[in-house]
Amino acid sequence: MYELVVNLDFAAAHHLRGYHGKCESLHGHNWNVTVKVASDGLDSLGMVMDFKELKALCGAIFERLDHKHLNEVAPFDTINPTTENLARHIYERLSENLPAHVTVVEVTTWESADCGAVYRKD
């Protein structure tokens, strides 16, 4: 099994519905996102896929989120834009657009340098 890892970021604001504390108020993060994808084999160039292509696919997802109020962006207009839900959203959107031989292993979203969440399907 071969794995690729990219580390990207975007900025966005959110508030947590139903939360009792500071995070119920509008606040922002410089989200750091680590994406890990894998494949059993390599393409004709000897790669799982081009890093540039993986970054572009992630960038297309982040474009809808970057410098936005996440609570106003689907699906976060109906589900809480928690770090956990954000990781799952990125995982699912990325899974829809990868080459057939490549799968998402996990997505980690960091809302700060020491607080993050991982989503993976086991």
Image (cartoon, helix red, strand yellow):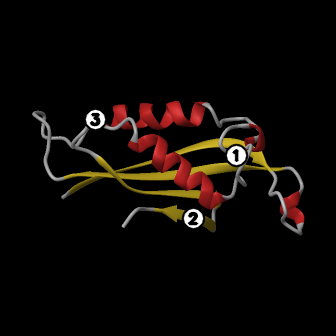
Q: What residue type is labelled 1?
A: Phe
Q: Which amino acid does label 2 sit on?
A: Ala
Give the mark nearest the N terminus, 1 or 2. 1
Number of numbered discs: 3
In the displayed structure, does residue 80 sit left or right of residue 95?
right
In the displayed structure, does residue 68 sit left or right of residue 117?
right
Q: Which mark is residue 76?
A: 1
Extreme-front residue of the structure: 78
> What residue did someone put label 3 on?
50
82, 1: nearer the viewer: 82
The image position of residue 31, as x and y in percent, is: 63, 50
Residue at image point 72% right, 35% down = 67
Whole-angstrom CA distance, mark 3 to mark 1, is 30 Å
Kindly indicate whether the residue at mark 3 contacts the one at mark 2 (C-beta within 8 angstroms).
no
Residue at image point 40% right, 39% down = 96
Q: At numbered mark 2, what does the secondary structure look like: helix, strand or loop?
A: strand
Nearer the camera: disc 3 or disc 1: 1
Q: What residue type is labelled 3?
A: Asp
> What residue did someone put label 2 on?
117
Give the mark nearest the N terminus, 3 or 1. 3
The image position of residue 98, as x and y in percent, is: 33, 38
Residue at image point 39% right, 44% down = 95
Name the quarter where the N terminus is drawn: bottom left
Nearer the camera: disc 1 or disc 2: 1
- Crowdedness near tag 3: few (<14), some (14–19) or many (≥20) residues, C-alpha within 10 Å: few
